């Protein structure tokens, strides 16, 4: 059984550069449509919960990074807010 969770994400590189700002997205947990570090951080959260997490490269974008946005082996910092738990699939 998987949850569809509506989240607000704000992310930074560990050096302080913001890479995402108030991005709202629906996430189907267990479907791998978001980086593993964020998905693992959402697990166990409740509606209106907020968490600030540090994500190591192996649970983020790894050795590849993202073109001109996230360098290889970057440590990421995310603030995650669960806006709603939409359904249980």
Image (cartoon, grey):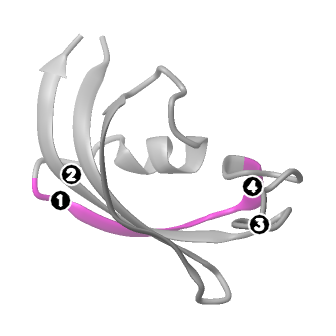
Pick the front one: 73 or 43: 73
Q: Which residue is mark 4?
A: 66
Q: Which residue is mark 1?
A: 49
Which dot, 3 or 2, sits closer to the camera?
3
Tell me the CA gap for discs 2 and 4: 25 Å
Residue at point 78%, 57% (across, down):
67
For residue 39: magenta? Answer: no
Judged left or right of residue 68, residue 60 is: left
Judged left or right of residue 57, residue 34 is: left
Residue at point 62%, 69% (across, down):
76
Q: Earlier in the sequence, mark 3 or mark 1?
A: 1
Q: Which residue is mark 2?
A: 82
Q: Residues within 10 Å of mark 2 (few under 14, many from 20)?
A: many
For residue 57: magenta? Answer: yes
Judged left or right of residue 42, residue 66 is: right
Judged left or right of residue 22, residue 84 is: left
Q: Earlier in the sequence, mark 2 or mark 4?
A: 4
**Quadrant of the image occupied by residue 5:** top left
**Element type at marker 1?**
loop
Q: Which residues are magenta?
A: 48-58
**Element type at marker 3?**
loop
Q: Residues within 10 Å of mark 1 (few under 14, many from 20)?
A: some
């Amino acid at each position: 059984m998987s949850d569809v969770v509506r989240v607000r994400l704000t992310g930074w590189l560990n050096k302080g550069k913001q890479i995402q700002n108030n991005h709202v997205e629906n996430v189907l947990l267990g479907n791998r449509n978001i980086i593993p570090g964020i998905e693992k951080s959402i697990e166990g959260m409740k509606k209106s919960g907020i968490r600030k997490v540090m994500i190591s490269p192996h649970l983020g974008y790894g050795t590849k990074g993202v073109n001109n946005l996230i360098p290889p082996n970057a440590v990421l910092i995310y603030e995650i807010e669960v806006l709603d738990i939409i359904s249980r699939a």
